[in-house]
Amino acid sequence: MSLRPLSTEKAVMSIETQNVLTFETGKNMTKTQIKKEIEDLFKVKVEKVRTSIRGGKKYAYVKLKKEFPAIDLATKLGMM
């Protein structure tokens, strides 16, 4: 698995306010691959994936559909 959940203060705030989970990903992963992996691993539906590269690392911001609260998944992953 090339996705690692982040639980920084900012990441936790976006879980609570925007239903967005933050992951560190492999640099060569596309948004489509990230979306498919999240949906397959966690049995949720992804609305949108944004990515950014900072400090040589790639981060994915995964917005879940409304019927899948990010806070539930974050709790399951031990982020909360």
Image: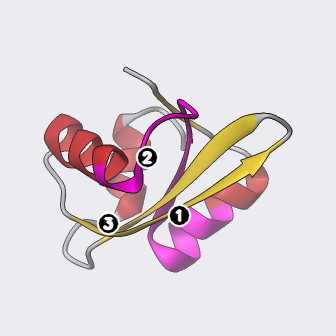
| N-term mark: 1 or 3 | 1
| Circles 3 and 2: CB atoms closer than 8 Å | no
What is the C-alpha distance between the residues marked 1 and 3?
8 Å
| Residue occupied by mark 2 | 74
Q: Quadrant of residue 44?
A: bottom left
Looking at numbered disc 1 in the image, what kind of residue is underneath it?
A: Ile
Q: Is residue 64 above or below residue 52?
A: below
Q: Which residue: 49% across, 65% down? A: 20
What is the C-alpha distance between the residues marked 3 and 2?
9 Å
Q: Quadrant of the C terminus?
A: top right
- Mark 2: few/some/many CA within 10 Å (<14, 14-19, 20+): many
| Circles 1 and 2: CB atoms closer than 8 Å | yes
Q: Which residue: 72% across, 35% down? A: 57
| Residue occupied by mark 3 | 69
Query: Residue 15 got which mark?
Result: 1
| N-term mark: 3 or 2 | 3
Q: Which residues are magenta?
A: 13-32
- Mark 3: few/some/many CA within 10 Å (<14, 14-19, 20+): some
